[in-house]
Image: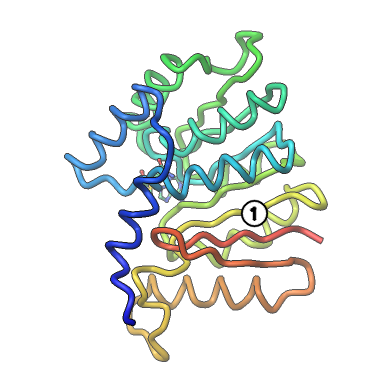
Amino acid sequence: MPVDYAALQTYLGDLVPPRHPELVAMEAYAAEHEFPILGPASCQFCYILTRLTGARSVFELGSGYGYSTAWFARGVDENGGGLVHHTVWDQELSDMAKKHLTAMGYPEAGKGAKTEIAYTMAEAVGVLKATEGPFDIIFNDIDKEGYPDTIAVVHGKLKTGGLFITDNVVWSGRVTENTPEEATTKAIKAFTKTLCESSDWDCAIVPIRDGLMVAVKK
Ligand SMILES: C[S@@+](CC[C@H](N)C(=O)[O-])C[C@H]1O[C@@H](n2cnc3c(N)ncnc32)[C@H](O)[C@@H]1O
């Protein structure tokens, strides 16, 4: 039987337990403004990975207005607390994230709280290069042409056994094109092939929503 992919994703999303009102508001904003947040099913998976690995330091590359950040922060908080880095190159999005995450009980870094968020408004890979690691999890959701260049930087900043999680590796199925013309599709395919063929990483792809790559640093 051919699978109705959109219906399947709706089914998976509907199974995610009810969320904090702030997350519900962020989901409504994404729907209204067509902003590409991960959504509940992918974020529930990231939250579970955070809990399973006991992660307490997370670095996000390309954070938007903090929806995925909130799920990593929740996992970190339940692991005993720590720091989540939010990076985006748009001041308005950074400010929106601060408002939402503060309302959820995760203040800006430096407040002495159990779980805090470090905000940087700049190009994310450059920020990662300049930030002291190692991190337990690095999450990647930047512009897709930038994906291949993240690998070496992330490898240098992740602890051994740490997770490198990347969104959009299915790219609405366009990755199945043998000779794609779009620069974005080419970049995602090059990124995915490099990681999967590398002896530095153990990789698995989970086709929730637009596809999450989970790579464990060996
Ligand atoms: C797909 S959205 C992030 C959504 C977020 N992960 C979530 O689920 O809530 C990516 C965001 O990162 C920004 N961005 C893309 N590439 C970036 C880069 N290299 N450095 C900083 N921000 C970037 C985009 O402008 C956009 O606001």
Q: Which residue occupies the foreground of this view, 197 or 155?
A: 197
Colour basis = rainbow
Rendered location of residue 184, percent (x, y): 38, 70
Which residue is pictured at 39% across the width and 58% down the height?
A: 209
Q: For the N terminus, which image quadrant? A: bottom left
Residue 196 located left or right of residue 181: right
Q: How many labels, in total?
A: 1
Figure check: 78 above or below 43: above
Residue bearing the label numbered 1: 164
Rendered location of residue 149, percent (x, y): 57, 63
Q: Which residue occupies the foreground of this view, 38 or 94?
A: 38
Residue type at mark 1 is Phe
Rendered location of residue 73, percent (x, y): 56, 29
Say which quarter of the image contains residue 128: top right
Which residue is pictured at 41% across the width and 83% down the height?
A: 176
Say which quarter of the image contains residue 6: bottom left
Residue 23 located left or right of residue 140: left
Which residue is pictured at 39% across the width and 31% down the height?
A: 18
Q: Element at badge 1?
A: strand
